[in-house]
Amino acid sequence: MRPTPLALLLACAGLPLALLPALAGAELWPVWMAALGGFLLLLGADLVLAMPPAALDVDLLTPDQIQIGDRAHARLVLGRAGLADEHEPLALEVWPTLSERFERVQAARVTLTGARSEAHIPLIALRRGTGVVERVWLRWRGPLRLMARHRIVTFDRGVPVVPNLSPVRSLALRYFTPRESAVGLKVERYVGDGSEFESMREYVRGLDPRGMSWRQTARHRKLICQEFRAERNHAVVIAVDAGRLMSDPVEGVPKVDHAVTAGLVLAYAALRTGDRVGFYAFDAKPRQWMEPAAGAATFPRISHRASSVDYTEDETNHTLALAELGARLRRRTLIVLLTDFVDTITAELMIENVTHLARRHLVIFVALSDPAWRRLASQAPDQPAALHEAVVAAEFGSERERVLRRLQRLGVLCIDAPPARVSTDLLSQYLDLKRREVLG
């Protein structure tokens, strides 16, 4: 319990009464004592009339899980003993204490109008793992608004924060119908391109004459043409860098979480097209490895592995990680490397080891660009500090382009895109490779 600002204001306003006995005469001491006693009596009455903390029932309902970057709510259910019509509305202030995996929120205000009311605590996930609603602070005032009572309720309620699968669901709605999702077939099969036999059909204008089957034509006495499709059963490995640079936030979410989301989108599409998909995560040393596999049960396994990729402050050891990955792969594989770098000097070892991988495998190098750097480099500076920031941002951008051009000259496919576009660009690159049968 503590006095409210209104009580402190009244106390300050009554201070001049304490000077009356000294200025006007000692006979005014009873007036001052009566005023002080009346003020203390009001404080005591307000404290007695205020709802006691024990009469307040508090319960917390949390969501089963939250996807990284999403916004959800925990429901704080408040109640008090007695019938609802026996109580006047009571205004409460709610301060939640959340762990560092959630964004800090401001105090909420809720009015307890009946026997039960609810307050919504926003939960904005910043990092994967288990976010915790540690405790809730509640404060309310007495009917005279002079004294405030409070109660601290400890919950320590954990809420799992998982990778964002919304882009994967969006991909399923855009590219797959419910019927084909049930039977495991892909909508776009790229019939007409590729080298894997698909079917025989009667020749019509527009089909490739080179696919003419003269044996079937002679048997059926009409022109029969073969159709082909892009070859399936390729090996794809999603390699995610989880080092220090990937823990830096971009648009409020760590880069490694953007990388995990993009990797899951590609894994879903690759599995639906018949390819085998594996997962690899590393920082200072290899952390996660899953052999490329096919089938509907593979995606949940990859999603579980991606959820367990932790944040770290260790520098990425590209030499150890990429050498280990190359030793694990026995056949030509599409390696999707989601990583980051700062400048040409720190990227030197990374380029050397990516080059070794590109000699045996097809590598897509995916770098997550920060839109804030592009804005700093392009905006017109209005003061010396802004000019310095623009120069530094432009220098970072030019060094980044030099590294990517060097990788492209070495035969590595490069994608440098902001988080909003990286999944789409990566999926488009993969589908283009499938159409051109570059994976084989």
Image (cartoon, grey):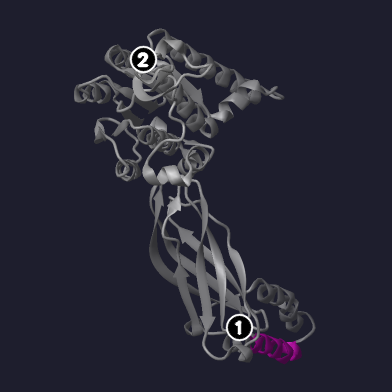
What kind of residue is marked 2?
Answer: Ala
Closer-to-camera residue (20/350): 350
What's the magenta bit mostly, secondary-structure-wise? helix
* Residue 164 appearing in the image: no
Magenta residue span: 26-42
Q: Position of residue 109 (x, y in %)?
A: 62, 68
Which element is circle 2 on? helix
Q: Position of residue 18 (x, y in %)?
A: 71, 80
Callout 1 environment at 10 Å: few (<14), some (14 to 19), or many (20+)?
Answer: some
Horizontal side of residue 8 vs 410, given as left or right: right
- Tell me the residue that label 2 is attached to: 218
41 in magenta: yes
- Tell me the residue that label 1 is attached to: 114
Residue at position x 40%, y 13% from top? 212
What kind of residue is marked 1?
Answer: Gly
Residue at position x 53%, y 80% from top? 79
Dividing the picture into quadrants, the one containing residue 193 is top left
